Amino acid sequence: MGSIAIVGLGAEGNAVFSPDTLARLKRADTVVVSNADGVVAVRLAEAGIVAIPLSDLDVEPAAPVERIVEELVALGREGDVAYVASGYPLLKEGMVTSLLARSRGNLDIYPVLSPLQIILLAFDIDLTADLDIVDTRSLRPDTSQRDSHLIVTGVRNAMLAEMVSERLASLYPGSHAAVIAGCSSDGSFSLQMRTILDLADGEFCEDSAVYVSPVSLEPPTGFQEFIRIISVLRSPDGCPWDRAQDHHTLRTNMLEEAYEAVAAIETGDPAQLADELGDVLLQVALHAQIASEAGEFGIEDVVEGITRKIRRRHPHVFGNATAETPEEVHHAWDAIKREEKAPGGGRKPEGTLDGIPEGLPALMYAQKMSRRAVGVGFEWETLEDVWDKVHEEIYELKATEPGSPEAIDEIGDLLFTVVNLARKQGIDAEIALRGTCAKFRGRFEDMERTAATRGESVKDLDITELEKLWKAAKARENKSKGADRS
């Protein structure tokens, strides 16, 4: 792998190659210029150096930096290469960083003396520190630049300076100092102290540059910054793990984070819930970013879609409809969903039970199907009717052979009916069962602790002793609840 040199001629017509730069160019196996008939090609020819234009590499002079970098890296694999341009090509947005990231050889930079060098020397900027150098027209202030030395080149006149001032004002305090470095008529360089707001009041020349020192500000927060961070993680220079993910690989993560958020709700710990909801939001943002990269949709589409849906499905809040109870809201919600999917609604018509994810836990799946059926009027008239159905299913289960396929079928019927019994009373069966599981776990762990204090293990005790431990655990639980209520 050869080395790559980036050489700047300075402003057209008023600079020459230094002896060191000429020596480096003559050592190069390939010298590349932007145009075959530009001033750079003429100066190289005068020095006896043959150069090839970008067009010979099937690259337009105005091509994106990555395209130019791609060809330079390819040439660098075969030997030493130099890219020469007027002005300061190392300032072309992303060129140096892209070359450093993609080439495995040496990267040499040969700018001639310029206001940029004057700034670097005058302010003794440590080149190993964070330093951002951007051209005026490429300036898009980024939060990362506030903690770095920032040099803006090509500020040729007051109009461009005004544009730079406005863009910097979105990131820095207006009173923050800025220094203009330019050339004087006698050939010397001048330094002018200004602030971000009065930058346009300075004097400028063809090669003027503006230096802005680092400023200590709190890092940005908020939803937009969060979305920006996700895009950075998915970028070529981001996180290898995040870049490797797609919708399919992230599906289990979405499920796990949702369950962990539910678990946090059950703990009653607000801080834990906030943390887990952030993890759920991360999954949403990752999926939106992946879709955005594929040209499918972005996070804005997700937000806009759910906003429209919420407004549309709450006509009792955002329209003229009425709904006085949660049950009425449920019925209206299901009716609106069916209308959306009906012919003329813009979507393929679906059955009442279509669209319920089959991967849901069985209890939650049963609840959703039950609610959908109720939405079209398939419902017991009274709670007592549901109780009658429960007793009927118990009787049918008792009539089957234990463990038989018929018993499995009847147990399913009984469970489904109990789900409806809960729904009819306004009880979420999933929450009710999870509460019972938590209660059982607490009592059983109490039994194990009590047995351990006696030097025993629950697995060695008979059912009589286990029943005693269970009743004692239950009594302690009830006593604790009574204390909490008091």
Image (tube, helix red, strand yellow):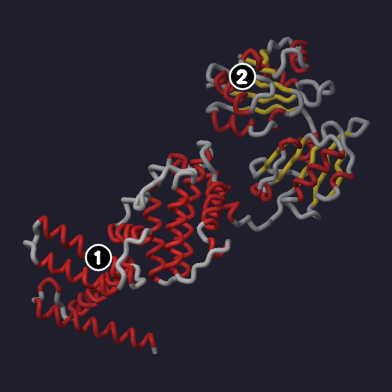
Q: Nearer the viewer, residue 445 or 299?
A: 299
Residue sitting at 61 percent across and 14 percent down? 29
**For mark 1, does the 10 Å Cα neighbourhood hold few (<14), some (14 to 19), or many (20 or more) residues?**
many
Q: Nearer the viewer, residue 86 or 410?
A: 410
**Residue 248 seen in the current view:** yes
Mark 1 or 2, closer to the camera: 1
Q: In the rendered view, would you say 23 is above or below 182?
A: above
- Inspect the image, locate mark 1, and give the three-letter code of the amino acid beneath it: Thr
Q: In the rendered view, would you say 339 is above or below 57?
A: below
Q: Nearer the viewer, residue 435 or 128?
A: 435
Q: Position of 299 compared to 189: left or right?
A: left
Q: Find residue 260 and report its image quarter.
A: bottom left
Q: In the rendered view, would you say 467 is above or below 21?
A: below
Helix, strand, or loop for circle 1? helix
Q: Quadrant of the C terminus?
A: bottom left
Q: Which mark is residue 417?
A: 1
Q: Position of 461 compared to 359: left or right?
A: left
Q: Position of 478 compared to 128: left or right?
A: left
Cα gap from disc 1 to disc 2, whole angstroms? 78 Å
Q: Which mark is residue 360?
A: none
Helix, strand, or loop for circle 2? strand
